[in-house]
Amino acid sequence: MYLTDLAFIEEGTPNFTEEGLVNFSKMRMISHIIREIRQFQQTAYRIDQQPKVIQYLLDKALIIDEDTLYELSLKIEPRLPA
């Protein structure tokens, strides 16, 4: 979301006004977004560990090798003839 907003501002708003002055309105919009991002980065999140979730994520049996994934991909979306 933030990256989209920043890209939209950068591409859709000129760096300079018609008078050749720095477009401070654009800079304020960018500053506002960066300030929000920094606020979220500085917030400490207290998340309790869930042993079942940790075990599930670390279970190697759930990991599928690349060749098998490729074969499954071709079954789901076969290549179109060239």
Image: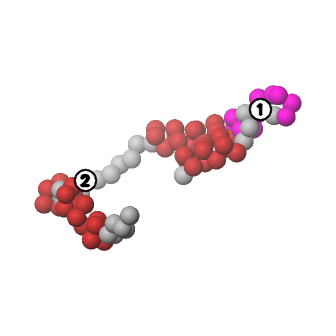
Residue identified by numbered label 1: 16
Q: Between 46 and 5, which is closer to the camera in this rendering?
A: 5
Q: Which mark is residue 49?
A: 2
| Residue located 69% across and 35% down the image | 27
Left or right: where 37 falls relative to 77: right
Q: Identify the element where label 1 is drawn.
A: loop
Q: Quadrant of residue 29?
A: top right
Q: Amino acid at mark 1?
A: Phe
Q: Between 77 and 22, which is closer to the camera in this rendering?
A: 77
| Residue located 13% across and 60% down the image | 61
Give the crowd class for mark 1: few <14, some 14-19, many >=20 residues within 10 Å. Answer: few
Q: Identify the element where label 2 is drawn.
A: loop
| Farthest residue, direction front | 82
- Of tags 2 and 1, the one toward the viewer is 1
- Would you say residue 21 sits in the magenta stretch? yes
Q: Position of residue 20 (x, y in %)?
A: 82, 28
| Farthest residue, direction top | 21
Bounds of the magenta segment: 18-28
Q: How is the image coloured?
A: secondary structure
